[in-house]
Image (cartoon, grey):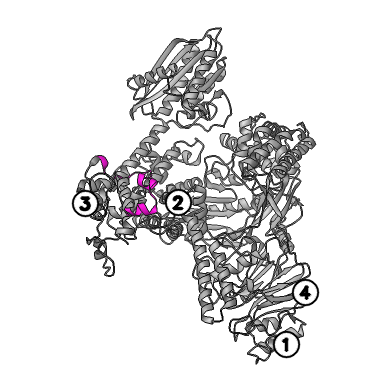
Amino acid sequence: MQVNTRRSGPTHDIALHFGNQERVDIIMIQEPWCSTGYEQNNTKTHPNYSLCTPVLHWTDSDTRPRVLTYVRSQHTDLDIRHITKTPLRDIIGVTIQDTLFLNVYRAPQDPTVLDALEAWTPPPHALVAGDFNAWHPLWQPGITPNWGANRLAAWADTHLLALANTPGIPTHDDGNTLDLVLTNLPLATTTIAEHLHTGSDHDTLLTTIPTSTGLLHHIPTQGISLKDPEDVDAFSKEVEQTLWILPEITASTTDLDKAATALIELLWSSALVTCKQRTRGRSTVWWTEECTTARQLYRQQRQDDTNWQDIQEHRRDFRRVIRAAKAQYWTNQIDKMRTDKDLYRVMGWHKPRTQFCAPPLRDGDELVTAPNEKADLLRQNLLERFNEETDIDPLSPTVPRRTVPWGKHIPLEEARAALLGAGNTTPGVDGITITMLQAAWRYIGNYVREFYQACLGIGHHPLPFRDAEAVMIPKPNRDITIAKGWRPISLLSTIGKGLERLVARRMAKKCVELSILHPQVAGALPKRSATDIVGALTHDVEAALDKRRCCTLVTMDIQGAFDTVNSGRLCRTLREQGWPENLVNWARAFTTRRRARVRFERHTTEMAPLHCGLPQGSPASPILYLCYTELLHRIGGQKRRYGYADDCAILCEGKTEEESRDRAQEVLDETTAWGAENGILFDTAKTEVIHFGRLRGTNTLPVTHGDHRISPKPTMRWLGIHLDKGLTYKRHIETRTATARKTAGHIRGLNKVLRGAPPLSMRRAVHTIVIPRALYGSEVWYPGNKRCSLKRKGDTHPMVNHGLTYSIDKIQTAINNALRGCLPVWKTTPIPALLRESSTPPAGLLLDFARQRHGLRLGTLDINHPLVTRASEHRRRNQKGGPVRPTILTHLMDNTPSFPRPALQNRTYKRLSTYQAEGQTKDCAAVDHKEWMRATPPTHITVYTDGSQQDPSETGFGYVVFRGEELVHQGRRRLPRAEVYDAEVEGARAGLKAALRHRHRGTDGITVCLDNSAVIYGLDGSPAVSSQEAFLDFIHTATTCGEKVDVRWVPGHIGVLGNELADQLAKEGARMRPADLETRPPTYSHVKRSIRNGQRLAFTRWWHNNRPDSYKSLDNDEKHDLTATLQPTEELVTLNRKELHWLIAARTGHGDFAGYHDRFNHPDANRKCSCGKLKTPRHPLKCRKTRRVDGPAPWFNTEKDIAEQLTWRFKDFIKHIKHNDFFTRICQY
């Protein structure tokens, strides 16, 4: 099918819809619609077609493509061809099953296309179609040839290309035959498809080729859909009935491979039997019945009406209906947004994504065009560029530096968390999805646990889990015509990834706990992020600069990274680090006998072996890679090295720039030499250097890496943070602000004042996308609202202005733009009103809040964390006794309230037998608990505990101990600077110890009952940060006391005697004043609550000082004042976009009001209501034409009543507007 759409968007959409309806294999568009003037190039697409374009990038109408070819997605042998060395925007060819289809557009009087065709020889099977703008007697008898027509006819005759059109039939509204099909394919026929007319001035041509072109009469199955509850139930029952096929698990590699295969076959066969098959084909989502009716009417008019002007009018009507239907569809997608999934889907629309098929790849001087050849080229250049030549014997002798303890038992909950806890990931070669595993877990859970345990017990990774499908993803802002412009992502078996994730989590915890890796390395370790590493680096630079020293930073990138890992070297390194032999064997199995196939667009290669490397996409690869490169980061001294995955950094300091450069050069050379000896190479083209100093004229000396001479840069981006010579971070703030501003523009484009997404959803987008993007890395560069001066005065460094006002104003501007799209307001609405109505603090407070959260987080990190060690080791006094200027890090630590630092704990599972009444009401749970009490023997001890808080400074716990039904002991205590959560766990610990003191020889177990599920979860093996010592003490006591200790949930405040007594004691305990009340440190939860309260107070004070005058006039009652809150306001949660606009406009005065129009000089605006009065913000509540909902008539409303209805009684205001249909019936906009 071919048609010239005349650059019309609706016509282009119609052509794709008609082609899909007719199940056309190839759609050729001339003069397509293409966006211009935007950063991202867009055109029309269809889910059932792949798009081929002659050019990938354009800037205006002079560079946009003039032809586009759409090929049905089921054709896997698609091959893009260019007939010239430099692609022309007027010609695009595709080859399918050895037949070339060339799409051509020749502009009038343009010789470019004719020159290209005359220099090209068509292959034996070719079809050339397009709009040639040529008049010639061969296809339009009786006409005089125009310019270029004779050349075209001679070229076709020379190459024996026959005309497939019927001569003399016009293809254009002016009566000429401009659209041609020239081919050497026998029996090819072309007709004018009147039923497929798109509304263009060109007719639609439909060409049929009787030979096989891959035409599909049905759309093949692409997977299994397991979404309906009926399908899930049927699948689960089928799995239950088919469990007998699973073999017994033994400690044999062969049997484990068979077990893995059987598990995959069980799930897949059950899904095939019970579930619906998912098909790839989708219709045009925006096509409606109105579009069908308009199409039929247009066709009828073309057949019956001979008046050209009437046909043109009907054509415009047809396009208008199509344009309106498509716009309405996307408007509905925005307006109906409710869930977070909908939100992030809509917010992802602005992200650049390729719409086009991959262009030919360059292999040296040759172009690779065939899909299978491109896939093979990517495989050779990305997956097979390294081999095992540099590998060593995995059994090479070595001496372990330590012994790493490793538990062999795997609890059921750990296996479940590893397999199902990662969310819905893309399935691997076996096609098993997370949804399948979740549905079948209750039947296969124990089998999977035993299977994982057996694999780790003998150190084996089953062969079916080593097969991968490598999907090629284009790298952003890279040249995708070369292999390096693509990134391979390995899709592995979901079941195998569960085993890998289990290993990775255990290894990561051990690495931190035993300091196996370099302390300044991150990438796969808990509570260590990229910004932590940059923060440690900048702290070191700050400290050096304060000592008037110079620093040199060299960053390097390891070439190939995961692909360079050799199995033998990895095994030797793991043995040196002290890992147990079974884990070393598992790593060896994981990295050997791997196979992969490459999926590139619609082509998939055969499975082929991989001889080295770790699969990208595996949960275990990052931690194994860090272990593999451990010694690399220890070269040159511990404090000089930093690393994150394959990014390495060297920091050296000296008295002068030359000294620091020379030291860095020495460490760089030593690192390069070590890498060459151990099979690790560096991409020298990515090596960068920068010199830090506070003297002018520095940052000039280069370093040498291999054959490259690297000159220092004024700014350097490392791990997402832009660093500059003086650590001013101006470039970083500008870059992050630009990113946030781009997202804010997308939000404004999605929403208008009276239509768009719900304001609450957009507010969530601002707070989860725009603000984090703007503030990324602020914990590194933001010093607080004041910074320590570089100059010392007396015995201190005084606090001075941070000097970032200009940069913070830029961040505020980006947030303001986002909020103007978030809220239904006019663009002149005051900024304080925007911030208050969206519950969004200003940028300065947001930075302060982020800094406070970072300080709170620092208190929860383990003692080996690089930021913690620096803050604790930083000297506050120099050798002469003078003060040392605090860095951003140490100043933050000094100004954050301290609390007991928690230890890094391994997650344990089911240490204590627990009971929680999930899914029950409190009344039913109380009945169950009383029945349980009656069933307990009289020798059983039951402890009830509870916590209570009378005010923020009065928190206490109470407990009672029963033996059978006899009360034997009770206790209570006050906790200073603590929360109810802390009181609950302290009460459980005190109650357990009291129960142990009152046990006797015949005691039949102890049960601790409490009504806090979060505390029960912590007692079950996951102690939280707050009161961690109490959790660990309780667990230790319960597991070593010699009695069976259970923890049980009990419904609170519902008549359970023990719980009621404990609650009363807790209230009494909160008012006690023990001797050590002031000596106990605050808990984490108390400090967190205090910081949060301080943030609320700061936002409230800011609002009180900056609120507009229109809001001040509404605050007549302190109890019901419009205050600023950090949580979404009630009006933001309950009102839709139109209703919220009415309310905010009335509050601010920025709306369709007479005063507003006078202020901004709008002479054409309607300033009066239909009642004759001027439009004012309060007029809807006084208009004589309105009817009362209840109460006195609106025109009797007092100023106090009006102020109340615009503040805390806003629902009455909205009800009044809607009841009177005020803004549509009485006072129209």
- Horizontal side, residue 788 vs residue 205: left or right: left
Marker disc for residue 639: none
Residue 789 visible in the displayed image = no
| Label 3 with label 1: CB-CB less than 8 Å | no
Q: 653 or 517, which lies in front?
A: 517
> Mark 3 highlights which residue?
1195
Task: Say few, some or many: other residues with alpha carbon within 10 Å of mark 2 (under 14 / 14 to 19 / 20 or more).
Answer: many
Amino acid tagged 2: Ala
Measure the alpha-carbon separation of dots 4 and 3.
84 Å
Residue 973 in picture, x, y percent from top left: 38, 19
Q: Residue at x 41, y 57 (%)?
A: 755
**Front position among marks 2 and 3:** 3
**Tag on residue 125?**
4
- Quarter of the image for residue 198 reads bottom right
Distance Cα–Cα, label 2 vs label 3: 41 Å
Check whether the beta carbons of the residues at disc 2 and disc 3 lie within 8 A of each other: no
Q: Which residue is mark 2?
A: 765
In the image, which residues are magenta? 1119-1142
Whichever of callouts 1 and 4 sits on the residue coming sooner in the sequence is 4
